[in-house]
């Protein structure tokens, strides 16, 4: 490996580590406003939607049917993991069938 590449990797790792440490240090000192807490509570779902929505918009019928299955399961279950697993399984099965 070239020294420049190794130096670039080490620099990126250091910056990534410093960002994480800064988040822990600053996050403990911030006043927790109810709006901030509500926004942070919704962040995992927003990230999943941001990842899934583009694929669904250009998706085939298998993806659309899997999305319907996920919405149906999510309507009755509060745990995020169960609809996620159902969605992945539904896409795999429906792609094999359709």
Image (tube, rainbow, N blue to C red):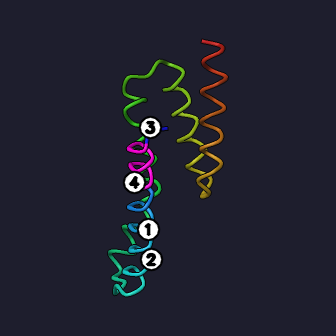
Give how far apart the Cα atoms at labels 4 and 3 are. Answer: 28 Å
Query: Which of marks 3 and 2 precedes in the sequence?
Result: 2
Give how far apart the Cα atoms at labels 4 and 1 are. Answer: 12 Å
Q: Secondary structure at mark 1?
A: helix
Splitting the image into 4 quarters, where does residue 14 fall? bottom left
Q: Which residue is mark 2?
A: 24
Give how far apart the Cα atoms at labels 4 and 2 are. Answer: 19 Å
Q: Is residue 5 above or below residue 24?
A: above
Give how far apart the Cα atoms at labels 3 and 1 are. Answer: 26 Å
Q: Which residue is mark 1?
A: 20
Rendered location of residue 75, percent (x, y): 55, 49
Q: Is residue 63 above or below residue 30?
A: above
Query: Which of marks 1 and 4 precedes in the sequence?
Result: 4
Quadrant position of the C terminus in the picture: top right
Q: Name the residue at 40% across, 52% down.
A: 46
> Circle 3: is it few (<14), some (14-19), or many (20+) Cα within 10 Å?
few
Q: Which residue is mark 4?
A: 12
Which numbered disc, 4 or 3, marks the residue closer to the eye?
4
Which numbered disc, 4 or 2, marks the residue closer to the eye?
4
Magenta: main secondary structure equals helix
Q: Secondary structure at mark 2?
A: helix
Read off the magenta span: 3-11
Q: Nearer the viewer, residue 69 or 10?
A: 10
Q: Are marks 1 and 2 in contact (CB under 8 Å)?
A: yes
> Circle 2: is it few (<14), some (14-19), or many (20+) Cα within 10 Å?
few
> Circle 4: is it few (<14), some (14-19), or many (20+) Cα within 10 Å?
few
């Amino acid at each position: 490996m070239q020294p420049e590449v190794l130096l670039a990797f080490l620099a990126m790792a250091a910056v990534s580590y410093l960002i994480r440490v800064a988040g822990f240090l600053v996050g403990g000192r911030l006043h927790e406003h109810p709006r901030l807490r509500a926004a942070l509570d919704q962040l995992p779902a927003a990230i999943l939607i941001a990842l899934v929505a583009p694929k669904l918009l250009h998706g085939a019928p298998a993806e659309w049917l899997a999305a319907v299955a996920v919405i149906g399961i999510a309507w009755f279950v509060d745990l995020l993991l169960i609809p996620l697993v159902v969605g992945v399984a539904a896409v795999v099965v429906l792609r094999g069938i359709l």
